[in-house]
Image: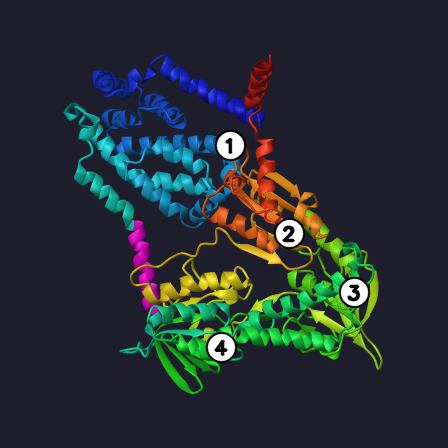
Amino acid sequence: MKNRWWILALLGLLIGLFFIFDLGRFFGLEALKESHYDLQQAYREQPFLVIGIYSLTYIVMAALSLPGATVMTLAGGAMFGIGVGVPVVIISATIGATLAFWAARYVLRDSVQRRFGDRLKIINEGLERDGMFYLFSLRLVPVFPFFLINLLMGLTSIRSATFFWASLVGMLAGTAVYVNAGTQLAAITHLADILSPVLIGSFVLLAAFPWLARWGIGLVKTRRLYARWTKPVQFDRNLVVIGAGAAGLVSSYIAAVTRAKVTLIEGHKMGGDCLNYGCVPSKALIHSAAFLKQVNNSASLGIATATVDYKFSDVMARVQRVVSTVEPHDSIERYTKLGVEVLQGKAIITSPWSVEVNGQTLTTRGIVIATGASPVIPNIPGLETVRYYTSDTIWSLTERPERLVVLGGGPIGCELAQTFARLGCQVTQVERGDLMMREDADAVALVKAALQADGVQCLIQTEAVRCEKDADTQCLIVCNQTGEETVLPFDTLLCAVGRAPRTEGFGLEELGIPVSSRRTIETNAKLQTIYPNIYACGDVAGPYQFTHTAAHQAWYASVNALFGDLKRFKVDYSVIPWTTFTDPEVARVGLSENEAKAQGVAFEVTRYDLGDLDRAIADEAAHGFVKVLTVPGKDRILGVTIVGEHASDLLAEFVLAMKHGLGLNKILGTIHTYPTWSEANKYAAGEWKRTHAPQWLLKWVEKFHTKQRS
């Protein structure tokens, strides 16, 4: 860092000397005209020396971003002519521009990326993908100041080689125009005379050519892709949606609300995974287990003794009752009343415009694939010989397993491990890495402590090796980092190692729709597959596997599919919240500390301990924290992690603030009801304000008060 400041100081000194001594007077149009004959004479006598001095001068001026590049280019034409002038000028200009690019990158980029990394992420991704096109277009249009392009590009992640060659080729046309003008120097009275509106327009068209060519190539490729399919003369429907989970339900609902003719196809249960196997049943079971925990901790509430008698089968029956109560919200009857045609059966896409179901072929202008995900079955030798369940099938249990082994330390594994432990099971959790690896260590530590307090044996950094079964027992053999094997007997094994998108059996292979290494359907930013009228959203598209993001994507997929001829929208992933519903809950939005460090984003941490919150103390839940990451010196929120009871509800205020650009000062200035959990957000904002109080002003105020007392 010290060396960088020395370089910055040296560059500043050189630029300062240029202006102090008014060296720019030597690089004006009149000065060039006056010395025109002498320069030509010097070139005829010592051509290589003059070219060398000229090139070095041009390189230094371009590297220091000094004014006079236009006149220097004219001088190249005036002295050398077009044949020699164009290559000398373009090479000198490109070398100088690259030096300026390197200077900006070395001196400023790291600090800029740390401070504005989150905002620059999209720009960097675009440059990584299309950097050559962007830079080439900017270089072709002379109205963009080239020195600014050099400096700004140095702050991004574009490769040096890409910058050099795009600059070299992109500046060629403009350089040729100016060098040619330099050969007729006597006719130029003002620099503005060189560029006519027609010439500028020509440059603009030339700059647009690569993009038009790219668009044209893409159009040809798309037409070739569609060529092997016969497009219907007319369509039965505007949209066919495959899958009736969160993404499919929202997609079909939006289509129906906008008066489109839409068909929703579901091969199993309406409501998808969230209603039948995920969010709804798990939260119902978590609530019952939490009540048992409260009873067991009754002494902390001033109740000497409290007992409860329950049957595991009754608890699981309640879970199914809750599912049945929610079921009408996602039912065939409800969506039929909304105007959606609902068909139950196996959907197969037979062409870009047709879907087959139950022997019937439906033609449609657009298709939305929302087939969700299913539990991953780990490849463990002997697994097929033992009694194992997944997060889909665990709800069929009617007898409580005395010994439960949970394989997986993600959100599903942690939630269910704690829940079954509270229901009286002896639970062992096995994770090959650490628990909840997407979260910061301080959040994970609190969850791990809570799991262990509830009786869960957490085996982290432990690999599942094989399953074994004999007449009386079944067990999982695991291996720790030292290679030591341990035998874990169980009555039930729960595999909760993740969920994989459902992409097979729907006709994707026949259409050639590519699938990523993570088995998600590959889509662009507008959720289009390689066929522009076929979209994917929800778990099957990624990158998130949350019900709320599936619904969020569904809006974009359905609107783009229905109205794409008018306008298509890119999905906004800027503010995505999520929660792990353990006790304590872990809720997060935006960057964690780990992610900010990995991305090189500069941040400050403000932390408020929930142990100080009056309502938390009254509820015997005074543990956890609110942690806010902000831009250094500013109240703009980069990310929030909340660990504690009601963390998922507390997070909503920060999600709103981040979405609409509100900082901590706005939260601090908002009245929060006392005593409530939401006050934690205000107190966290207050902690930030306290550490950023203007000390110079407080000292002045202190002197003012002292004087007032005298």
Q: Nearer the viewer, residue 345 or 204?
A: 345
> Mark 1 or mark 4, which has the lower sequence index?
1
Cα distance in 3D space between marks 3 and 1: 49 Å
User: Extreme left residue here?
Assistant: 187
> Measured along the vertical axis of the image, is residue 694 above or below residue 680?
above
Q: Nearer the viewer, residue 373 or 689?
A: 689
- The residue wearing badge 2 is 439
- The residue wearing badge 1 is 106
Q: Nearer the viewer, residue 79 or 26?
A: 26
> Mark 3 or mark 4, which has the lower sequence index?
4
Among the 4 quarters of the image, the one containing residue 496: bottom right
Q: Which mark is residue 478?
A: 3
Labels 2 & 3 near each other (Cβ < 8 A): no
Residue 600 is covered by the magenta coloring: no
Residue 105 picture location, percent across and down? 48, 34
Cα distance in 3D space between marks 1 and 4: 60 Å
Magenta range = 210-225
- The residue wearing badge 4 is 331
Labels 3 & 1 near each other (Cβ < 8 A): no
Q: Disc 1 residue type?
A: Tyr
Q: Residue at x 41, y 36 (%)?
A: 152
| Secondary structure found at label 3 | strand
> Mark 2 or mark 4, which has the lower sequence index?
4
Q: Residue at x 59, y 49 (%)?
A: 678
